[in-house]
Image (spheres, grey):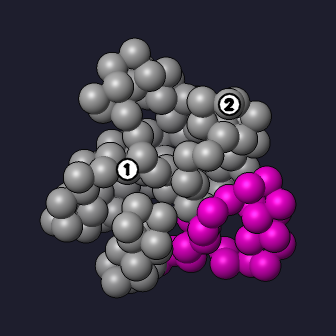
Amino acid sequence: MATILIVDDSPTVRRTLGFTLKKHGYTALAATHGGEALEMLAETAVAPTTAVDLIIADVSMPEIDGITLLKLLRANPRYHNLPVIMLTASGQSQDRLHAEQEGANGFLTKPTSSHELLATVEQFLG
């Protein structure tokens, strides 16, 4: 089954999303901010058996936020086509527009239902 990296500064969000994804057969990894996510991606590049298939990233985080992470991923040929779903508490249209302009594949508003999470993930992973 696919590996999904959850990037969010909230331990509750990471735990909740991870639980739902694992319950449905996905492998869930977690990072607290964009910098940690980039480190994890670099590690998985060395060990392809743990490669990340999709990222769910919060828009607003300390250090490297979700939009900056998205920009860095889209600028890197290795991750340019990696599906990224942006997650935000605000649901503001400007966050969504900015994320879409930077190449986000999907968008979820917190709190999101298990059904909506899984439907969005399955849209990109089949």
How far across and how far down the image is residue 101, in percent? Answer: 83, 60
**Numbered range of the magenta stretch:** 87-111
How far across and how far down the image is residue 26, in percent? Answer: 24, 56
Which quarter of the rendered picture does the C terminus lie within? bottom left
Q: Which residue is mark 1?
A: 4
Q: Is residue 67 left or right of residue 58?
A: right
Residue at image x 57%, y 54%?
84
Mark 2: which secondary structure?
loop
How far across and how far down the image is residue 13, in percent? Answer: 39, 61
Whether residue 65 appears in this view of the structure is no
Would you identify the image quadrant in which residue 73 lies? top right
Q: Amino acid at mark 1?
A: Ile
Residue that lies at the very extreme toward the front in this rendered image? 126
| Magenta stretch holds residue 5 | no
Q: Which mark is residue 77?
A: 2
Residue at image x 79%, y 54%?
102
